[in-house]
Amino acid sequence: MNGRFRISKEALYFKFPTLLADICIQLAVLWGIMYGTDMIREGNMLIYEKSGTIVLLVLSTVLSAFILGIHLNERNRSAAIIAGQAFLNAGLTWALFNGLMAIIYELTLQGKALALQLVSVAILTAALHLIIRGLIGLIRKKGANHHTVIMVGMDENMLAIYDFMTQKRYNDKGFSVLGFFADREEGIPEGSLLLGKVEDAFAYIEAQPLGSLKEVFCSLNPATDSETVNRLVSLCENRMSRFTFVPDMKGYPKRKLHFSQIGNVSVIALHDEPLNDPLASLVKRLTDILLSGLFLCTLYPFIWLFCAIGIKLSSPGPVYFRQKRTGYEGKEFYCLKFRSMHQSTDADTKQAVKGDCRVFPFGEFLRKTSIDELPQFINVFKGDMSIIGPRPHMLHHTDIYSELIGDYMVRHYAKPGITGWAQVNGSRGETKEVSEMKKRVDLDIWYIENWSISLDISIFFMTIWQLLKGGGEKAY
């Protein structure tokens, strides 16, 4: 598993203390429920008080960290991803612990206690991880825990990497660029050091204490400087410094590319979606079925009755609005919504705009609160959609924007969602300019290429937060 611990400074100073703190949270919440509430039945209290229960809880927490990893110290993770990962760790620990208790002690599970345990631990763990991440950021801003690197060669891509690492807003990532080795002085960024020519890099790397130079970025072309590059690779490996190629990708699309092998030939793929993994796809589908099924069997009938009455009293016509949308791999499907507009002939071609006369008052409430989107849980259960994914667009927009935006159709490599990465980043509602749709497409593609369970969890909670705040400026 990617999350396995290695004995390193990162593990010793960050991961291990975080794991201990997670264990303390798990124990504190369990003891709080046991002795601070009356949710545990008297007959079960004797089981919870066994020393084996503490062992199972600690074991479950450690197993969860071992399986999923603790990544809050990694330099390129956002706060949202860290919070999502914390929720996932807490959820897996909860499932392992209560499952083991049921198997070993034949414990009758209790709904209220289980719900309180899951919610409390998830919130406290996420808060703790964010606090620790903030402390790590402060430590790095003070100059400690830095990832020291040098740049060998200089081109446009190398300068872009340097710019990313040295911007003030990335100070909490802890990159320390020692300087450049290049055969020309022109173009060296202001404030950076020219440490010497390319050939001087060898002596410099040799002179550094073993393992102190964390990474060497090299933009030399192996096809024309093969001897120099191979010597550099060998030296870096012997000196415990990571070697990273920065190839000249001029002319290639500016997106995340993926290298792989076909026989002995290296090839570049424009996309490598994590959801192509059958296990990842299965996990996402099972999650969709479970959550949508639970919602449709519990809350949805009451919501439907409330909305049906409001819609019927406001405007003649059906409760549902069914519209063909573009779905997974470009296939068409009927997307369901609670009807929020008077019936019209332009419903399949015209977006809702601010002050749209087609929207009746109750419909405006449905759109403002996003309740009109809830029937899409039926689409999720059927398999046309997912809870999280790129929003499905009407066929008319697909026809238009697929001509105007070159990579528009890439967003259909994943099932469309009720909410998505673009929506929680402000790209929702009316698109007046092509640039607005382009931004949405870029965010959708980023989601597809960087999907993870923790990212989905983050988007879910970010959506809830935005709904509580009022749905955003374009919720009309």
Image (cartoon, rainbow, N blue to C red):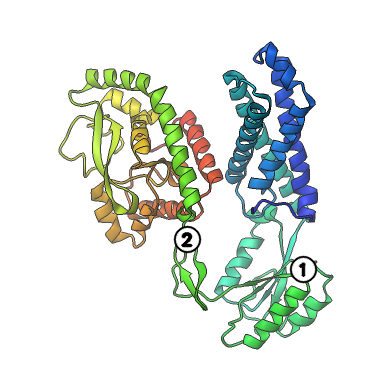
Q: Looking at the image, which residue is at 50% across and 41% down? A: 459
Residue 148 % position (x, y): 74, 65
Q: Which mark is residue 187?
A: none
Task: Judge the density around disc 1: few (<14), some (14-19), many (≥20) Cα neighbours within 10 Å.
Answer: some
Number of numbered discs overlaid on the protein picture: 2
Going by the numbered disc 2, the residue's amino acid type is Asp
Residue of label 2: 272
Q: Residue at left 27%, top 44%?
A: 333
> Residue 377: x percent and y percent?
37, 33
Comes first in the chain, label 2 or label 1: 1
Q: Quadrant of residue 470?
A: top left
For the point 44% across and 68% down, the residue is: 253
Q: Nearer the viewer, mark 2 or mark 1?
A: 2
In the drawing, does residue 143 fall left or right of residue 129? right
Residue 472 in view (yes/no): no
Please state if 470 lies on the left or on the right of 219 as rendered: left
82 over 301 or under it: above or below: below
- Residue type for callout 1: Leu
Q: Is residue 155 above or below residue 285?
A: below
Question: Considering the numbered disc 1 on the image, is that residue within a helix, a strand or a loop?
Answer: loop
Image side of residue 222 versus residue 13, left or right: left
Q: Quadrant of residue 181?
A: bottom right
236, above or below 58, in the image: below
Report the residue marked by disc 1.
213
Tell me if mark 2 has few (under 14), some (14-19) or many (20+) residues whose alpha carbon lies within 10 angstroms of its own: some
Indicate the quadrant containing the C terminus: top left, top right, bottom left or bottom right: top left
Between the residue at mark 2 and the residue at mark 1, the CA separation in whole angstroms equals 31 Å
* Mark 2, secondary structure of its residue: loop
